[in-house]
Image: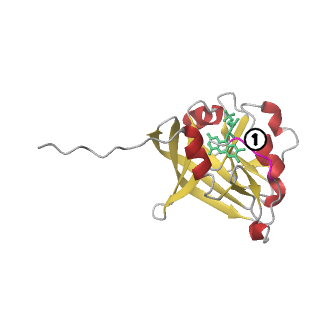
């Protein structure tokens, strides 16, 4: 007698995106240095801490990301954690390979040469530890080499259900944005 395997349903990309959008996240700009020596960066919320010892963090990049290509070459990156007042930076760095995105954005090279943005809540300077497959994304696991925090009590920029949100329930924007 054979046992029928249970039917396993698949979800569509739209269903998955809608459901996972209920998981509120912070918003970061992940920066690195391109092959031409110029700064690059992309908005990313698929970010998580991985390990305390050693200190590891992961970022999931669309495989077509130009920032991902730069990180593969440079071998290092910075996770810049945005404050609520920096929503414009999130929109700015969500534009693919847009060099002019750096116009007027105050930053300085960090330990690894990757740009550290001014006035972010926290910066995690990383070197690439692992590169892992992740479907249509690539998972970059970084070893954290240096950290900085603002320590000024500024509130974080949040992303929830396809838009920006604020701590305490006040929606700072319901602008729908594309995410990974
Ligand atoms: C709030 C928000 C979160 C995002 N999170 C990610 C992410 O985690 N990974 C990713 O690959 N793209 C993410 N994106 C999309 C990229 O920022 C966007 O595709 C960008 O144009 C990629 O630029 P690049 O190709 O120059 O790296 C996000 C966009 C927004 C607005």
Residue holding disc 1: 93
Q: Residue at x 19, y 45 (%)?
A: 3
Which is nearer the eye, 4 or 23?
4
- Locate ligand 1 by image quadrant: top right
Which is nearer the eye, 21 or 137?
21
Residue 46 shows in this picture: no
Residue 34, picture quadrant: top right
Q: Residue at x 62, y 41 (%)?
A: 180
Q: Residue at x 30, y 46 (%)?
A: 6
Secondary element at tag 1: loop
Could you tell me what secondary structure mostly forms the magenta stretch? loop
Magenta part of the chain: 174-178
Q: Is mark 1 within 8 Å of ligand 1?
A: yes
Which is nearer the eye, 62 or 49?
62
Q: Residue furthest top?
A: 36
Q: Is residue 177 magenta?
A: yes
Location of the N terminus by quadrant is top left
Residue 94, picture quadrant: top right
Q: Residue at x 57, y 44 (%)?
A: 15
Label 1, residues with CA under 10 Å away: few <14, some 14-19, many ≥20: many
Q: From the viewer's perspective, tell me whether residue 96 is left or right of residue 20.
A: right
Q: Residue furthest front?
A: 1
Residue 120 shows in this picture: yes
Q: Residue furthest left?
A: 1
Q: Is residue 16 magenta?
A: no
Depicted 121 relative to depicted 29: above or below: below
Depicted 68 relative to depicted 107: above or below: above
Q: Position of residue 45 (x, y in %)?
A: 64, 50
């Amino acid at each position: 007698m054979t046992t029928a395997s249970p039917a396993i349903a698949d979800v569509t990309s739209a269903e998955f995106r809608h459901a996972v959008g209920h998981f509120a996240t912070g918003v970061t700009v992940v920066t690195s240095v391109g092959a031409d020596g110029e700064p690059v960066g992309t908005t990313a919320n698929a970010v998580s801490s991985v390990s305390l010892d050693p200190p590891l963090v992961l970022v999931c990049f669309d495989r077509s990301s130009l920032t991902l290509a730069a990180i593969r070459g440079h071998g290092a990156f910075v996770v810049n954690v945005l404050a609520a007042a920096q929503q414009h930076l999130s929109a700015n760095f969500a534009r693919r390979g847009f060099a002019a995105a750096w116009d007027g954005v105050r930053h300085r090279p960090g330990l690894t040469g990757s740009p550290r943005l001014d006035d972010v809540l926290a910066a995690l300077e990383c070197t690439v530890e692992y590169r892992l497959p992740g479907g249509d994304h690539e998972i970059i696991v970084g070893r954290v080499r240096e950290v900085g925090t603002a320590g000024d009590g500024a509130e974080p920029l949040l992303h929830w259900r396809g838009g920006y949100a604020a701590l305490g329930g006040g929606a700072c924007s319901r602008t729908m944005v594309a995410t990974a």
